[in-house]
Image (cartoon, helix red, strand yellow):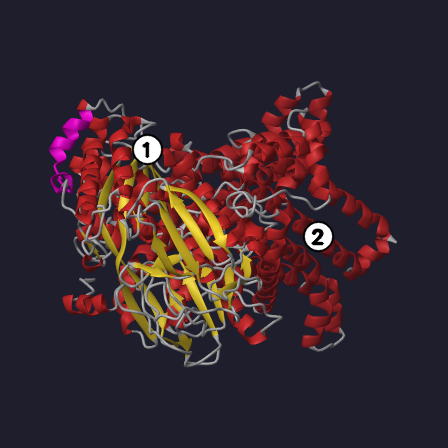
Amino acid sequence: MTRVLAGRVASLGFVLWLVTIIAFVLIRLAPGDPSAVMLGSDATPAAVAEFRARYGLDRPIAVQYLAWLGHVVRGDLGNSIYLGRPVTTAILERLPVSLTLTLTAFVIAIVLGITLGLVAAYWHDTWADRAVSAVAALGLSLPSFWLGICLIYLLAVRWPLLPSGGFVEPWRDPPAGLRHLLLPAFALGYLQSGLIARMTRASMLDALRGDFVRTARSKGVGEIYVVVKHAFRNAVIPVLTVSGIALAVLFGGAVVIETVFTLPGVGRLLVNAVVRRDYPVVQGTLLLVAAWYVVVNIAVDLLYTLSDPRVRLRTS
Amino acid sequence: MVRTLITSAAVLVSMLMVTGASGASMDKCPAQGGTIRAAMAGSPPTLDFVTSFAAQARDMGVYLYEGLVTIDANYDVAPQLAEKWTASADGKTYTFNLRKGVKFHDGSPVTAADVVASVERFRAQSPRKADLSMVSGARAVDPNTVEITLSQPSAAFVPLLAYPGPAVAIMPKKLIEDVPAGKLPQTSIIGTGPYRLAEWVPDKHVHLQRFADYSPASTDASGYAGRRLACVEHIYFVPVPEVSSRVAGVESGDYDYGQNLPAETYKRLSATTGVKTFILKPYYEIFMHLNTQNGQLKEWKLRRAIQVGLNQEEIMLAAAGDKALYRLDPSLFFKEQFWHSNIGANRYNERDVTRAKALVKEGGYDGSPIRIITSSDFQFMYNAALATESQLRQLGFTTKLQAYDYPTMIDIFRKKRAEWDISYNAFSIRTDPGGFTFVLKSDSGYQPYASKEVDALLEKGLLERDRKARAKIYEQIQDQLYKDIPMIKHGDLFGFDALRERVDGFAVFYTTPRFWNVWVKDKR
Amino acid sequence: MARQTARRWRGLGPAADLALAGLVLLVVFIVAGPWVYPVSPTLVSGSSRLQPPSWEHPLGTDQLGREVLARVMAGGQQSLRVATLTMAFTVVAGSVLGLLAGAVRSLDNLLMRISDAFLALPAVILAIALMAVREPSEGNVVLALVVVYTPRVARVVRGKALLIREMPYVEAAHALGARLSRVARRHILPNATPELIVQATFIFGYAILDEATLSFLGVGPPPPAPSWGNMLAEARYLVRDAFWISFFPGLLIGLAVLAANILGDGLRDRYDPRKGE
């Protein structure tokens, strides 16, 4: 098992490394001299000279990349032009917000998705099934910012039940924090729940038609027991996979939601950086997002190997 | 159908709330403590606001810092850190006596050496340094007395010293020595104001906290001067660039204050229980800068085409959002000011489209897009740019519009002259006409325009002592501007802010909210 | 050929048929609309601000007096252009890369790893980052989206290519000396085409959504060119007082993407009933 896992980690590590190349190359695509691009036009000649020395801008590109990479692995992502502070600091300040939002949205997506998927699977080919399909399809098609704006209008302005934006740390003030999270996390999670619902339905149907279930049913085992113990356990793997993808993708959706609900997260940091041409921040955020993706994938793989006895047996 | 939202009666009433009304002047706070959360239009790029153009930086500077002098409710000079000052007989030496016992936020006492260092830093690094070009030196006579010498006598000196945008803030000498512009670390944001900086997370909030050892002045509060008491314990300035979020936030109570709100929401917010609305008049005058040095608008005929062809009524209506929130006016100065003049009015809002089109041809316009930059932080600037852009296309120009947040736009405006042809701007009231020096003088590098005549006039204006004669000089400058067309004025804009009723004692002034001498009615 | 297809049209199921019809109607509305209703989408008129939908202005006017119907149509044209170009270029680039990966063993691993790296970044984030280094314009939005979507299409084509490659008749052809390109053309591509069509349909929908997202965030084509995304962004503060400005563009985005998704599902069910469920 460890060997398979190690192989996976290595593969993901390779992916991460490729992402660093993408991030490095991306910035070199910006018009202008890299030091002007990275330091801003405000920079003093001394700052420019120091920058050039640090990243060896007069040396071959491969050497430049290695120099930059060396800084990156030590956690030094350079300085934000606009904020005048280290990119790492700026990102770390905003990470808790984005993570809280993403994880809450993920919980909502899972709960909503699995519930809807189970409903659709159990009562398949009835109106309930079709309704769930419709809800899921809507989730994939509606623009998240439109949904967010409509939610704000309905639940924060017309009937002021929830706050219209802003972030309160849930660990510092749980009730207020949760109230502020509800709308953005729902707007974000709803969109992913569609995918999860679909996959749950599909794999549940597969499982319900499978041998285990027929055997259990013929033995006279109770229906609920059948559904939960046998079908669901087998259905969970593909759902896990889709969930993993969802969690990784949620980070992308968070960008828009953070803007709509004025949450000071990494997504908003990125958008502001792009508009202000604050390249070091853009680069740093890309790397962070890729790292997140890798972490999530490793976690999913771990759960995968732990939960499926077939996989465990095969690999030991 | 959305009609005129504000009746004349309301306008009259709000005029009472205008700049003249003093914030409640008090001897002590009716209630102490609590928090105010203010939703601001943008994010300050730095809190080293002496060296920054950005209005957002100035909004907070007023809480943290004080100067030798400042402005009162009538925009006249009032004492702040200096309790009195005298001029020598020849008008070239000013002696300021500092108030005693004033402390910086870090506990150190304010001395003349700090004042001298601050003035010198302003003269070296502030974008407004040209305003103090008449100053030749500053020195500490004794720990409580500062002497500033001028190269020539100037009636504008003290008013320009008092002007708050940005102010000549007094900071500790040891913290500002040898620090380049805009590079003051957060730990060095130390002043003498009623609030100190507790925390600044860029793009997230500026958290100010009451300064316990603040020494309030002895005179009644008026404008930025007088007895400023910090009754509220914590103030959070939260940048909320999305206008809808600001409005929604004030409506729902997430924020206690919403800055610069759109006219369309005025009626609704005024009717909302728990919310008070304020009209700020005067607020800003909206201008566009034309690039006289790079690009197509180097050609005067094309600039004249724009000047002749624009319909400023339409543009101001689009910018302000309501007829009652703007007025057309050709002058550099506001109607309320002594310096106001109608010279050049014949070239303001001419709306002669035929003439304009002809001039476009005569000017040899080659068809390449006129690049306009504007700010997305300020809705009025954004809308004005869109309205202008639409009209320019009617005149035969092709256009390209780009919106940025305000600090980025300023950056491009000042440093990337090859990238724009038209740039937007808004000027707040100049308490002294000399306040336009840094805007118009060629050696200040503020805008591409350079005119020997205007330079000479500006210098004269700083030194002339007779008020009427000064007014004449600035009138000539205005005339020259209408002839050279480096800038075109759209009109005067009034602002509209909203406040939750839990905050009491508030009154508007100038362009920034004053949360001193206010208190909160509940314990949040 | 078209007549043959029409005769053989068994329908894709009621939902997908409806979706297709809806999309066609939408396209006609957007493309032909300005001919029927030649009002300028960018003419600012202070005096006609914020008119609710009426006979004179079917969808009302916005905060600058601009006609919403005209803007919706113009914005739709931009969305259609971006979506169509993105779809076309992505299919081409994805096919080429997928075929290369599937057919040429030595390139497979490298190409797939590279595409994995791109897939590690959510579409929106990568697209936004790409816009950081390009000037905001329609062309660059297309470029960014193509870069983002190509790896996904390449994977699909590669999958098909690998499948086909194993088939005995292909191996036979190869043994007989057929060149790779001929194999690709005659065997792999025709087999991959149905799946490509499905992918193209989904990409069309995602492109509309992503273009709107980029415009909404302010990194798309700059004003005053209307885009469904920036119409929503500009009128956010008027959701309560003038809902028609943000409602219609948002609605159209949702409908267009929904139609594309349903159509794609229908196509997928038709061509690969095993996958459908």
Q: Nearer the viewer, residue B333 or B264?
A: B333
Range of residues picked out in magenta: B345-361
Residue beneath the point at 34% across and 76% down: B274
State left or right for residue B512 relative to residue A22: left
User: Residue placed farthest to the top in the image?
Assistant: C177
Q: Residue B355 in magenta? A: yes
- Residue holding disc 2: A295
Please indicate, yes or no, whether residue C59 appears anywhere in the rendered image. Answer: no
Name the mark nearer the viewer: 1 or 2: 1
Q: Is residue B296 above or below residue A241?
A: above
Q: Are labels 1 and 2 assigned to the same chain?
A: no
- Give x and y (percent) for residue C205: 46, 46
Tag of residue B421: 1
User: In which quarter of the view is residue B374 placed?
Assistant: top left
How many numbered markers are drawn? 2
Taking B418 as reference, is B136 above or below it? below
The chain under label 1 reads: B
The quadrant where residue B294 appears: top left
Q: Residue furthest front?
A: B89
* In-front residue for pair B463/B374: B463
Q: Is residue C2 left or right of residue C94?
A: left
* Quarter of the C terminus of chain C within the rendering: bottom right
Per the image, label 2 sits on a secondary structure element best described as: helix
B118 on left or right of B383:
right
**Label 2 lies in what chain?**
A
Q: Is residue A67 left or right of residue B419?
A: right
Q: Residue at x 43, y 72 (%)?
A: B229
Q: Relative to A155, say whether B305 is above or below.
A: above
Asked which secondary structure carries label 1, the reply is loop
Q: Position of residue A304 (x, y in %)?
A: 75, 57
Determine if the magenta segment contains residue B139.
no
Where residue B100 sits: x, y (%)?
48, 65
